[in-house]
Amino acid sequence: MGKNKSDLFYSFIVLLVLSIFFFIGHQMAAVKGTFQESQMILINEKYDHNQLLKILLNNLSVGLIILIGSAFYTLLSFATVGFTGLITGVSFGKFSAIYGVGYATILLLPHGLLEAIWLTTFTLASIDLSKRFLSFLKKDIEYNQIFKRRTIKIIFLSVFLVLVSAIIEVYISPNLLFYLNN
């Protein structure tokens, strides 16, 4: 299987894992019932630079955990993607219970699509690192060949997508809800 077909296959698997756990999380929230409004982000709440930094650091740490997962043949990477999908699904379910599915979708969709992409690209980099690390352990490649230029480009692209999705999550998504609510 060629590199592009392999990347497409793994991208599909990552998005499938994310979607399955998102659905499970959403169902968990639905079974739990309605939630108190104090547990959720209020529509009129304005975010600041501290919130951006918090979200950015959280998302970068998720990306780092995915990359570290390459040492475990990406099992940790896929577990991290699944857990992220689960948490996102629960949050979506909670927000849907309070404000409705439309508002929940508007809050999640603008940055959520980019988050799904950077989760996928970080996992692709993890898979690539994992394959190279195993080759290094088998002594098929030298240590300096573990990090290929392609993998480094994917990591930088992922970090850029994390930054853009955090900016959208802090400054654009809440404002969309604010303007739709007024």
Image (spheres, rainbow, N blue to C red):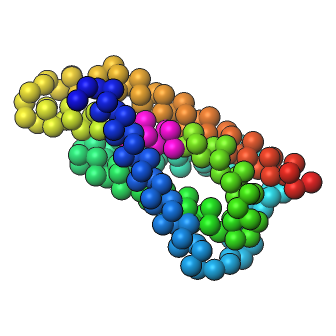
Image quarter for residue 34?
Answer: bottom right
Query: Is residue 117 positioned above or below 27 on the image?
Result: above
Q: Is residue 91 left or right of residue 1?
A: right
Residue 99 vs residue 170, the one in the foreground: 99
Q: Is residue 55 left or right of residue 101?
A: left
The chief SS type of the magenta part is helix
State whether residue 121 appears in this view. Answer: yes
Residue 111 vs residue 50, the one in the foreground: 111
Q: Is residue 29 left or right of residue 78?
A: right
6 inside magenta stretch: no
122 inside magenta stretch: yes
> Residue farthest to the right?
182
Quadrant of the drawing holding the N terminus: top left
Residue range in magenta is 116-125
Question: Percent x, y for residue 55?
Answer: 60, 48
Q: Residue at x 44, y 47 (%)?
A: 15
Q: Residue at x 36, y 56 (%)?
A: 79
Q: Is residue 157 left or right of residue 128?
A: right
Image quarter for residue 128?
Answer: top left
Residue 27 vs residue 84, the one in the foreground: 27
Question: Percent x, y for residue 63?
Answer: 44, 43
Question: Percent x, y for residue 137?
Answer: 11, 36
> Residue farthest to the left?
139
Q: Residue at x 31, y 52 (%)?
A: 76
Q: Residue at x 45, y 53 (%)?
A: 18
Question: Percent x, y for residue 26?
Answer: 56, 66
State whether residue 64 appears in this view. Answer: no
